[in-house]
Amino acid sequence: MATAYIIRRAVFSAAHRLHSEQLSDEQNRELYGKCDNPYGHGHNYTLEVTVQGEINPTTGMIINLADLKAIIEQQLLKHMDHRHLNHEVPFLKDVVPTTENLAVACWQQLQAAMPAGLLYEVKIYETENNYAVYRGE
């Protein structure tokens, strides 16, 4: 059987504030600059979820893309789209919502809803020039 990778892309908008409770207000301002705005700031994020697996010889698929889309919607988008990540997303509680931490949190949410070994990579673009990748390592 052949092994392949398939990628599903989703876009969501969210606000966040980069601020660590472990640092003083001054340290946060120095470290995060304008991203430490107490009211937050927003991004139009792009999420790419890559799955890997054997191609089913009957269906020709690793996973039905409609099923993958539904998992992404249920596990992530319904919680994150048009939300303030610091205040409204339970799985980001007590996490500084950097792009790196978002990638890890998204992985954890997706992995809990997918068959073992299927999830290969989560990539989050905060801007067209900045993104983070996590592979469960």
Image (cartoon, rainbow, N blue to C red):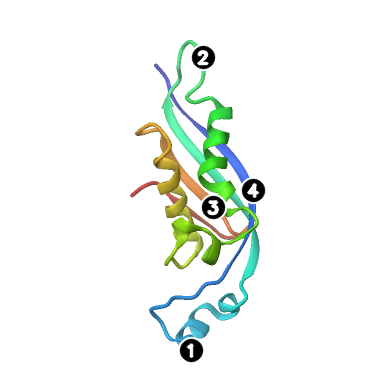
Up-down relation of residue 133 to residue 100 (above or below): above
Up-down relation of residue 78 to residue 68 (above or below): below
Three-letter code for the amino acid on which mark 2 is drawn:
Thr
Three-letter code for the amino acid on which mark 4 is drawn:
Val
**Residue closest to the eye, 92 or 102:** 92
**Rendered location of residue 41, percent (x, y):** 64, 70
Three-letter code for the amino acid on which mark 1 is drawn:
Glu
Q: Nearer the viewer, mark 3 or mark 1?
A: 1
Q: Which residue is tagged 2?
A: 59
Q: Name the residue located 38 percent from the left edge and 79 percent from the top edge.
A: 22
Q: Which residue is tagged 3?
A: 124
Up-down relation of residue 21 to residue 133 (above or below): below
Give me the C-alpha separation between circle 4 and circle 2: 28 Å
Q: Which quadrant is home to the N terminus? A: top left
Give me the C-alpha separation between circle 4 and circle 3: 10 Å
SS at badge 2: loop
**Rendered location of residue 36, percent (x, y):** 56, 78
SS at badge 4: strand
Q: Which residue is tagged 1?
A: 26
